[in-house]
Amino acid sequence: MDAMPGNDPDVIVVGGGVNGLVCALLLARSGLSVQVIEDKPAIGGMHRTEYPFAKAPRLATFTGAHRVGFVPRELVAHLALPLPLAPRDPSLFVPTTMPGRYLLAGAGHEGLLSAAGGVVSERDRDALSAMFAELDALASDLAPAWVAGPLAIEEVAERWVRPALQAPFVALCRGSFAEYAARFGIQSALLKAALAADSLGGSFASWDTPGSGAPLLVRHAACGLPGGGDAVVTGGIGALTRTLAEQAQLAGALLGTSAAVTQIVVEGNTATGVVLADGRTIRAGAVVTSADPWRLRALVGADRLPAEYSRRIDTFTRSGGIAKLNVAFAELPRFACLPEARGQHRATTFVLPGGEDDTVRALGRAFADASAGRLPSEPPLECVFPTAADESLRDPDGRHSASILVPWAPYDLSGTTWSTEEERFTNVVLDMLETFAPGARALVADAVLYHPKRLETHFGITRGHLGHVDDTLLFGDRLAPTTPISGLYTCGRGAGPAGGVFGVAGLNASRRVLADLELALEQTEIGTR
């Protein structure tokens, strides 16, 4: 266990992931004494660089999050520190099985409009330009909304969005990606599927599911930033949380690891501290938890929360999430459509099922299988090759790692179990990659599958959902930083404003803690006069 308090702190932050560290850093800078308590041996939450390969023990990869997501400028301004981010360029690669047919896009919106590989026609470039123009306008209007307090989507529209775009904004957030893309007349099935896959990685939703338009908005807002919104973390994704942890400690926060919180102490209707697994109680003026909503409920006790709040948590439950396959390769696989090196391995790669004209229907079949508790026979894959973007992550033998996300994986399998299907599904994923990169299987030195139940135990997240709740939920549809318990706040990824938005839930929680503690201090001073 690392540093733990000699005296009771002003604030306890439960969980040392991105949002917990952002919250702790900002509170410590404000002069409060802050204790971060993390149950894992290392800080970082789902943003950790790890070494899971028994046959390549010195090869690094990303077992949890492998993309940074949307880092709003407003948050960067609040943090006031250099983050170890570099542009991902190329940013997007979508191979086909046909030589010379692929999509390879540079950073940002312009990169997609000028993508190589013959997939984007002039007509589709015009359609994309029109869609991007509307999304650009929405992103501009919403810039302050990402770091504002939680409001319902309709209230966000009324407060922040220009009148002409309020109805399209609500329709995008509540409706489907398919409906939104159809408005602009995008023709290429592969392009539509690629855009959907690029935004839906944290959603148990297909491109025609209500709410599937919401992640497109977040993804587009990210892509408008320098670096294209899909940055590479210099030194591995764990370097990002190490930077936040170091800055929090410099500001005076204490970071304790290997210390599990088993209960949040509530007296009356006020959170007054936490109980650790070893039986110790630490008291504080406020408790902020970055746990997912179900763990938050368990730590408090469901009987202490209003029934309506508990029912709302239950509405977040989905029948599945993602699976992650981490692979050690002797060398980078070569894609049949683009065997020569054009930087494609530095991009986020989407391997999509079906032929070029059947991709959208194939995505629908894969999602239907997962929704019914079946493992898709041809799953879509989102691949990142960390060692191609950062050679420092390679091992002494020069091996490469891949982090492969399967966006739709059932939590419970129909008629079988994950332990039974683990090896078979690993082969399904590798076979899918082999179809587009012949010879890839022969390069595999080791592979480790993190299915939803393994992600659940490895990271301590309910049902293995890396985003805590579905990315189809935005703003007030997610948890607010305050809870029905006085002095208890939440800054987990299930809180607003959106999935895939870096650190803002931690910022929002820190603001509410400071405002409430200042109000309590003012009331105390008035009472003693």
Image: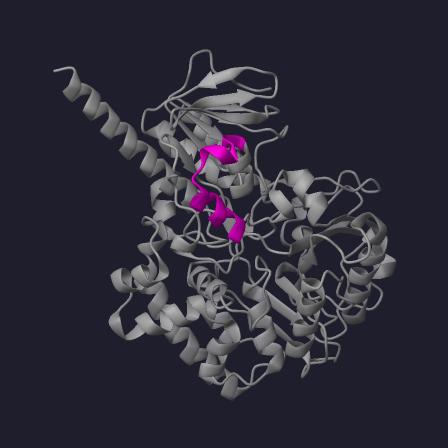
Q: Quadrant of residue 352?
A: bottom right
Q: Position of residue 222 (x, y in %)?
A: 45, 59
> Which of 350 and 418 lies nearest the eye of the viewer?
418
Can residue 7 be found in the magenta stretch? Answer: no
Q: Quadrant of the C terminus?
A: top left
> Which of 343 and 67 lies nearest the eye of the viewer?
67
Q: Quadrant of the N terminus?
A: top right
Q: Position of residue 439 (x, y in %)?
A: 85, 65
Magenta span: helix, strand or loop, mainly? helix
> Which of 67 and 411 lies nearest the eye of the viewer?
411
Compared across the picture, whether 309 is left or right of 385 comes to left
Q: Residue at x 49, y 31 (%)?
A: 300
Q: Residue at x 69, y 52 (%)?
A: 411
In the displayed structure, 147 sits above or below 79; it is: below
Q: Position of residue 146 (x, y in %)?
A: 36, 53
Can residue 304 be found in the magenta stretch? Answer: yes
Q: Residue furthest bottom?
A: 123
Q: Position of residue 78 (x, y in %)?
A: 34, 42
Residue 116 seen in render: no
Q: Quadrant of residue 47?
A: top right
In the displayed structure, 481 sits above or below 101; it is: above
In the displayed structure, 387 sits above or below 526; it is: below
- The magenta region covers 299-315
Q: Quadrant of residue 199?
A: bottom right
Q: Residue at x 47, y 79 (%)?
A: 128
Residue 262 seen in render: yes
Q: Residue furthest top?
A: 6
In the displayed structure, 483 sits above or below 426; it is: above
Compared across the picture, whether 522 is left or right of 339 comes to left
